[in-house]
Amino acid sequence: SAVISQKPSRDICQRGTSLTIQCQVDSQVTMMFWYRQQPGQSLTLIATANQGSEATYESGFVIDKFPISRPNLTFSTLTVSNMSPEDSSIYLCSVAVLDRADGYTFGSGTRLTVV
Amino acid sequence: QKEVEQNSGPLSVPEGAIASLNCTYSDRVSQSFFWYRQYSGKSPELIMSIYSNGDKEDGRFTAQLNKASQYVSLLIRDSQPSDSATYLCAVNPGGGYNKLIFGAGTRLAVHP
């Protein structure tokens, strides 16, 4: 399966600032996704990162708050903008190589605390 | 709205027993199904995928899929304390979607 490097692994940020999370994959992948996992909760999809075009956001998530870039097939970034304590969460990059049984894998996650 | 439902648990089983985890989904056209294991503080790890009705076995794990009844289950034989984790069911809704929809997860505790 694809090997994903996600960084930073954790950060503590001041409210009102922004943090950019990077996701680097060791091979070209078809799909890249960004998820959020709030404490004690399951995974919620933020958006699908599309190569060369704007990301596709899920209901409740907007581009101004969570801008996403995907300049090529192996790299994507998620920015959490104008942060508030409610943004404290784990953010996870996931990739999918279609038609592979082991296609959907996750990065190690970024634990974000906003103070 | 497409949903994936799991019993949140905790499901407590003795070491050596069979743990049975269940998941139901609402979108009848769903095409593929996944079970992830997540240890506390770690990211989800894929343990099983299943696409066709019936059983699929991999070591101590067996995934079962019944599309007519819209449920998928995971059996863990000879449960070990190291199996204690949260198990997440995920569904690819199909119909051209590629994203996964996750259930809330079932916390499994295997006690010696």
Image (tube, rainbow, N blue to C red):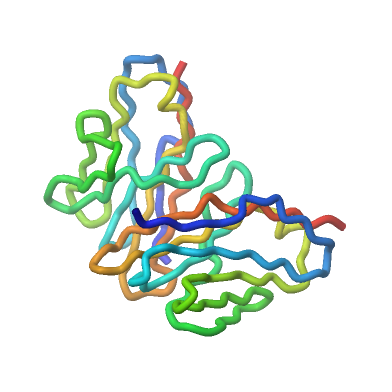
Most foreground residue, A95 or B93:
B93
Q: Is residue A4 left or right of residue A58?
A: right
Q: Quadrant of residue A44?
A: top left
Reply above or below: B92 against A49. below
At 68% from the left and 75% from the top, the residue drawn is B60
Q: Residue furthest right?
A: B112
Reply above or below: B69 against B91. below
Most foreground residue, A25 or A94:
A94
Whether residue A93 is visible, yes or no, is: yes
Residue A61 x/y as whole percent: 28, 37
Residue A102 x/y as whole percent: 44, 70
Residue A65 x/y as whole percent: 26, 29
Q: Quadrant of residue B73?
A: bottom right
Q: Is residue B1 left or right of residue B102?
A: left
Whether residue A28 is visible, yes or no, is: no
Residue B56 x/y as whole percent: 55, 81
